[in-house]
Image (cartoon, rainbow, N blue to C red):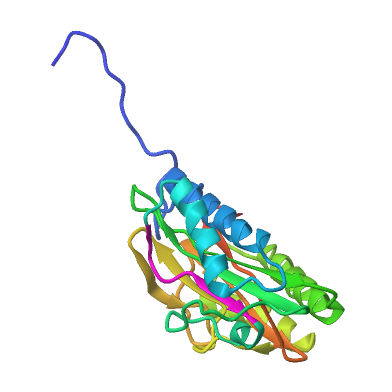
Amino acid sequence: MTDTPSRRIVPAWTYRPGPDVSDTPPPGLVAAQRIAKEAAAAGLAVAAEGVTEKQVELAISDCLIENAVEHVWTITNVGLGENTLVCFPTNPPTDLAAVARDVLMVDVHPVTADGFWGDCTRCAVIGDYPEAEAALADLEKIHYETLEKLKPGMPASELFGISHERLVAEGYVLLDQLGNIGHSLTSGAAYLHHFIDAGNTTPMWGAWAIEPFAARGGIAVKVEDLVWFGRDGCITL
């Protein structure tokens, strides 16, 4: 003990029953998601006729390395043409090249040096392809309007219902192989609280990746953002 008076360290909030969750996401998580978004943008930036999926992956990897990221928690997904219809860890980038009218889809999963995980999906339309432009714009509109309806602790199944109802109403078919629009995400682990699907009633707290993946008129599109379900509100990272 010293003669200098010390101060108490106390919680930033008053106790109440239920999960103790911070109002704001950990800074490390914010940084990981910033890198995920930046790397996804780097992949889209090289989109052009003739560019291959593997070349896009290398552009993403270069961006990750520039941000001191040496690991990803699952593969970097890159899809062109018919490969946009599947976004799954068993489908790595190939030598398939973009054609004159195409869609590029990237899904990036960085692990930062201090162990935080990010997750971001973005798409870009290549060439004069108005049907794809409309499919992507409408999906993104549904996605971001759905994010405005998020509530801390809401059941995952409720969120799925809100999103899926809009998707079906606007002519989309859900493409996710497991029938969901996202999953839980923590430092060092994904899927611990399972998926955002019709049967998962888990209350949503902490970080969840929300990623509607759907097709309209045979054109597959996807968008993904990480959301922090905090004590009193939801924050899109």
The N terminus - image quarter? top left
Where does the magenta region start and end?
71-80
For the question of whether residue 180 can be seen, the reply is yes
* Residue nearest the observer in this picture, 111 or 47: 47
Q: Is residue 70 magenta?
A: no
Residue at left offset 84%, top offset 81%: 131
Q: Residue furthest top?
A: 3
Q: Give the image quarter of residue 8.
A: top left
Q: Is residue 18 above or below residue 102?
A: above
Give the percent coordinates (x, y) of residue 98: 67, 77
Q: Give the image quarter of residue 198.
A: bottom right
For the question of whether residue 233 can be seen, the reply is no
* Residue nearest the observer in this picture, 125 or 175: 125
For residue 214, side relative to residue 194 (left or right): right
Residue at left offset 57%, top offset 74%: 53
Dominant secondary-structure state across the stretch colored magenta: strand
Residue at left offset 78%, top offset 89%: 171
For residue 121, side relative to residue 102 (left or right): left
Give the percent coordinates (x, y) of residue 154: 55, 69
Q: Is residue 74 magenta?
A: yes
Give the percent coordinates (x, y) of residue 148: 70, 62
Q: Is residue 128 above or below residue 57?
A: below
Residue at left offset 45%, top offset 75%: 202
Give the percent coordinates (x, y) of residue 222: 64, 75
Q: Residue furthest front?
A: 50
* Residue nearest the observer in this picture, 215 or 207: 215
